[in-house]
């Protein structure tokens, strides 16, 4: 089992390095914490709780342990990250919401093998029912998909270990890969991946490993037209590129869900889009 690195248990370390430096510098200068937090919210788009906790931590104040929520961490300050067996490219990174686009996550052969392996298992994808949490067929989601078990094959294990190393997050805190196939006009309309604790159905899913702290969508094919992953609240669209992956954090280090992670799989216009989605949980997913 891969242990969660201690550095994950730090609000300060969860900030981009330039903000870590800013916080340390201003704490050292004796700046007023609430004023600093306000600047972090205004200029860095951080949530107020996270800003306050990071400042408190940098000031050497005791921070309530229960307030600390381990969170994936990506070393994205150079353009390449060595993740277990593969050297992965960092193509862009934004901090709030935290979105990172990676290149070279999977080889062409790995993409093709995942598609071939799941081809006979694809079934219409569902959404989480609001009342009871059961999977429901809905017009908002028209792809077909296959849910894999963690470690189901050597290839699946290899990819899971690679992703775990890339984001410093235990393999056990991940759901099995979900391979999705979108044909012409198939889509996944705007939705959140995090479970709303105030709604009965989604709340049930929290019992099995806690919140979905982050998502990785890996593109297994190029798509001739359409099929981008869009984030309507932040005006971002990622075009599918075989072997690339988009990572986004659904919660911050204080455990707050991020409404700016609203995202959609845009309708495919031409070609077939294949993706493999990995949802990362706060705790072990059994
Ligand atoms: O198909 C996509 O681009 C996004 C997939 C997605 O939103 C999901 O699996 O949660």
Image (spheres, helix red, strand yellow):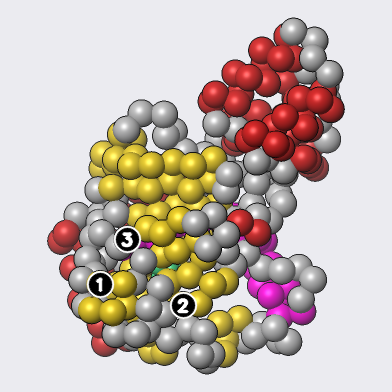
> Does residue 23 appear left or right of residue 111 in this picture?
right
Residue where numbered disc 3 is placed: 239
Q: Kindly report the distance in space between the C-alpha atoms of the residues bearing marks 1 and 3.
A: 9 Å
The answer to whether 213 appears left or right of 34 in the picture is left
Image point (53%, 25%), residue name: 17
**Residue 188: assigned label:** 2
Which contiguous range is marked in magenta? 200-219
> Mark 3: which secondary structure?
loop
Q: Is residue 96 above or below residue 7?
A: below
> Which circle's residue, 1 or 2, is located before the other in the chain?
2
Residue 137 circle label = none
- Splitting the image into 4 quarters, where does residue 92 fall? top left
Q: Position of residue 176 (x, y in %)?
A: 45, 67
Label 2 C-beta lies within 8 Å of the nearest ligand 1 atom: yes
185 relative to 94, above or below = below
Q: Which residue is label 1 attached to?
A: 225
Seen at 48% across and 70% down, the residue is 264
Answer with mark 2 or mark 3, whichever residue precedes in sequence: 2
């Amino acid at each position: 089992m891969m242990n969660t690195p201690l550095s994950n248990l730090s609000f300060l370390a969860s900030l981009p390095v330039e903000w870590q430096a800013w916080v340390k510098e201003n704490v050292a200068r004796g700046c007023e914490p609430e004023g600093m937090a306000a600047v972090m919210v205004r200029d860095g788009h951080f949530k107020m709780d996270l800003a306050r906790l990071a400042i408190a931590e940098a000031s050497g104040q005791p921070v309530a342990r229960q307030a600390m929520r381990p969170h994936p961490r990506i070393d994205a300050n150079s353009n390449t990250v060595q993740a277990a067996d593969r050297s992965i490219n960092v193509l862009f990174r934004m901090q709030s919401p935290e979105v990172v686009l990676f290149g070279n996550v999977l080889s062409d052969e790995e993409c093709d093998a995942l598609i071939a392996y799941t081809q006979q298992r694809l079934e219409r994808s569902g959404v989480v029912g609001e009342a009871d949490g059961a999977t429901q067929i809905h017009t908002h989601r028209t792809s077909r998909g296959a849910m894999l078990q963690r470690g189901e094959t050597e290839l699946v294990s290899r990819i899971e270990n690679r992703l775990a190393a890339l984001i410093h997050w235990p393999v056990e805190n991940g759901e099995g890969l979900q391979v999705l196939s979108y044909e012409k006009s198939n889509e996944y309309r705007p939705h959140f991946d995090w479970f709303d604790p105030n709604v009965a159905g989604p709340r049930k899913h929290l019992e099995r490993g806690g919140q979905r702290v982050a998502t990785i969508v890996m593109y297994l094919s190029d798509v001739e037209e359409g099929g981008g992953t869009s984030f309507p609240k932040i005006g971002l669209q990622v075009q599918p590129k075989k072997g690339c992956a988009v990572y986004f954090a659904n919660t911050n280090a204080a455990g707050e869900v991020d409404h700016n992670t609203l995202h959609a799989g845009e309708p495919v216009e031409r070609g077939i889009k294949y993706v493999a989605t990995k949802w990362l949980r706060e705790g072990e997913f059994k």
